[in-house]
Amino acid sequence: MKVKRIRKILLGVDLAHFSEDTIKFAVETAKIRRSKLTVMFVYRSVHPIINLATPKKSSPNEIENCKSELISLCEKHIPKSVDWEAVVIEGKPIYQTIVRAAQKISTDLIILGEHDRHQQDEILLGSNAEKIARYAPCSVLILKNR
């Protein structure tokens, strides 16, 4: 069996519930595989439980703040020897946004950290990680937090 080369890794992060173990694993995997690491945060413009009818308009400042936070996080945890980029995408649902992004950039592996179902939409709609694993165009690795 031929092992597929992993050239591009997408790491999905939740800025509110960040896992150092998950980013460390993604960085080590990128180092070993000599892969490009895309660290992605999905900014949700709608709060589905609070107000279903009226989407919240995001301001460029909110998205830029998320991007700055994500870049700081990456600079803190990713050595210069790793080829990486930080991406903030606005979209909903989260799992579809990540799946579409993975298709667009031809990702070979998606890495996600599992966290408690803390968000109302996850309670109603199920786990984003589970849906990403189901619909992704590539392999998905979900790290359990223990």
Image (spheres, grey):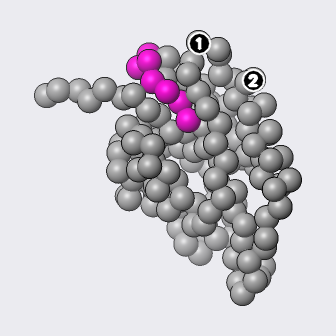
Look at mark 1 in the image and give the residue it sits on.
81
Left or right: residue 56 compared with residue 117: right
Residue at (62% x, 63% y) in the render: 91
Q: Residue at position x 65%, y 36% from top?
A: 86
Q: Residue furthest toward the left?
A: 1
On-image quarter of the N terminus: top left
- Residue 12, image x, y percentages: 57, 44
Q: Nearer the viewer, mark 1 or mark 2?
A: 1
Give the CA distance from mark 1 to mark 2.
Answer: 13 Å
Left or right side of 116 for 4: left
Whether residue 145 is visible here, answered yes or no, is no
Q: Which residue is mark 2?
A: 76
Q: Are marks 1 and 2 in contact (CB under 8 Å)?
A: no
Q: Which residues are magenta?
A: 32-38
At 83% from the left edge and 46% from the top edge, which residue is drawn? 65
Residue 10 horizontal/vertical position (percent): 51, 39
Identity of the amino acid at label 2?
Lys
| Tag 1: amino acid | Ser
Compare residues 106 and 75 and report the one nearer the observer. Answer: 106
What residue occupies the far front of the structure in this picture?
A: 60
What is the residue that sits farthest to the top in this orientation?
A: 81
- Res 60 → quadrant: bottom right
Q: Nearer the viewer, residue 54 or 3?
A: 54
